[in-house]
Amino acid sequence: MEYQDFTELDRVIDEIGNYYDHVPAAYVHSFGCQQNVNDGEKIKGVLQQAGYSLTDRAEGADLVVFNTCAVREHAQQRVYGNIGALKPLKAANPKLLIAIGGCMVQQREVVDKLKQSYPYVDVVFGVNAIDRLPGLLAQRIRAKKRVLMDPAERYDIIENLPIHRDSTFKAWLPIMYGCDNFCSYCIVPFVRGRERSRTPEDILAEFRTLVQSGYREITLLGQNVNSYGKGLEKKIDFSDLLALLAEQEGDFRLRFMTSHPKDASRKLIDTIASHEKICKNLHLPVQSGSDRILVQMNRKYDVAQYKGLIDYAKRTVPEMTFSSDVMVGFPGETEEDFEQTVQLVREVRYIQLFTFIFSKRTGTKAALLEDDTPHAAKAQRINRLIKLQEEIAVEEAAALAGRSFKVLVEGPGRQPGQLAGRLDNNLVVEFEGDAALVGSFAQVKVTGSKGIYLQGGLEAR
Ligand code: SAM
Ligand code: SF4
Ligand code: F3S
């Protein structure tokens, strides 16, 4: 379905325009993962087209949109806190509109809570209803009544939504939506719905536009990119798609996330190995190093399989780096299970680890399991992992001294006059250089490291 099919846009723009006596400013804030950040960019695009300008402050805005995340209880509490903080803004400016979208509002109890306890929230819109946001705002203005969408309402993938990207040189490119994996702890399949792949034609068209517009790094997004292609008419898997994009002309590099270890294949590693434009970094969330816990998590791989794939990748692409998500304190996780996770982290030597304490999500299978590990023990486990991880990352960074790398210059470094550039392997190097280099590729010789940051100098191009 195409966004252009939305015929009421002119009327909606008039209704929104007439409500304010100046060009209204919208503040859009996204919580959660990259998929959500990309959705936030579409929300901004759709709002701009509806007549809003964009602002980076909630204070003074005419519309505040929170694009929410439900993955952990803490993430939800943060959103409620942020919504609470809008109350005085609404009191000072009764014309302020507040809209809440994203994963949280796909849960009925959240919509009920917003309805009862947050009367100043004007609009609630679901994850698949970004195209409808301007219409819902116009409806709120016209009817002078709150418009709270039912979480059960679902929509097809809408192609060609207007988009306001946050960066001019790094872009997110979703290749699929939703998730079918039902890991026992995870709320995502419930709030994002079933897995749907975009067609290779739609992806390629967006990809080409990005490359032609000067985007240098394009990250393909999906909750499990390795199951891309299911349900499409054309027979294509993720490795085929990756190769197709990597073979396009232009000065760009490709990343992707997230790979699920049960579906990541040797073919994927071979594809990375044979294409220069595919970054040599693999984010492969393991969650736990204990087979017993992996079964409980419904992850559908075991540690031996996981290590087998990592070993194959290390043999095939020696310069490849790895990162992962690890959860501690899953119900029933013993010290022994946790030690196995520590052992795995030591063996793989991840350069980056995203660590989480298990959070009980209502409606998931793991929410029904008995969880008798005290919070203090879980906190101790996560702290041990974080410390170990940092030691490994520092050693991995130090080992690169003396080598030269092509980097994408992302912005200022931590010291005045310094720039920060990202290597293909996802490590960051700081070096002296002109700010005009931001957004372009540069060749940098690594001279040493400070903690996890490489230090280096620009080389002639
Ligand atoms: N689809 C990706 C995958 O399978 O690895 C990741 C998606 S999830 C948005 C990102 C990370 O959040 C997961 O890898 C997991 O470690 C963590 N996570 C998900 N549900 C959680 C929960 N209930 N409690 C704590 N962490 C959770
Ligand atoms: Fe959640 Fe598992 Fe799907 Fe990732 S693969 S989004 S962890 S259910
Ligand atoms: Fe959060 Fe939704 Fe992403 S729950 S992590 S924003 S898919």
Image (tube, helix red, strand yellow):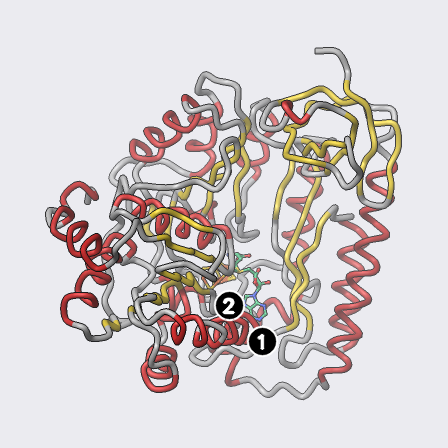
The residue shown at (48%, 28%) is 215
Q: Nearer the viewer, residue 94 or 167?
A: 94
The reply to whether dot 2 and dot 1 touch (C-beta < 8 Å) is: yes
Does residue 125 appear left or right of residue 455 in this picture? left
Give the camera-side residue of 63 and 197: 63
Horizontal side, residue 249 vs residue 44: left or right: right
Q: Is residue 395 left or right of residue 333?
A: right
Relative vertical location of residue 88 with respect to residue 61 in this rendering, above or below: below
**Furthest-front residue in view?**
21
| Residue 187 figure quarter | bottom left
Q: Residues within 10 Å of mark 2 (few under 14, many from 20)?
A: many
| Position in image of residue 55 (x %, y %) | 44, 50
Residue 354 pos. (x, y %): 66, 57
Q: Is ligand 1 closer than 8 angstroms to the Cβ of mark 1? A: yes
Give the residue number, with chain letter if any, for mark 1: 359
Residue type, numbered disc 1: Ser
In which quarter of the view is residue 426 placed? top right
SS for dot 2: loop
Quarter of the figure with the N terminus: top left
How far across and how far down the image is residue 88, in percent? 45, 75
Q: Quadrant of residue 395?
A: top right
Position of the C terminus by quadrant: top right
Q: How many marks?
A: 2
| Label 2 near ligand 3 (CB < 8 Å) | yes
Q: Residue 23, relative to residue 274: is it above or below?
A: below
Distance from Cα at disc 2 to Cα at disc 1: 8 Å
The residue sitting at 54% across, 79% down in the picture is 360
Q: Nearer the viewer, residue 292 or 25?
A: 25
Residue hosting label 2: 71
Q: Amino acid at mark 2?
A: Val
Secondary structure type for disc 1? loop
The front one of 352 and 275 is 352
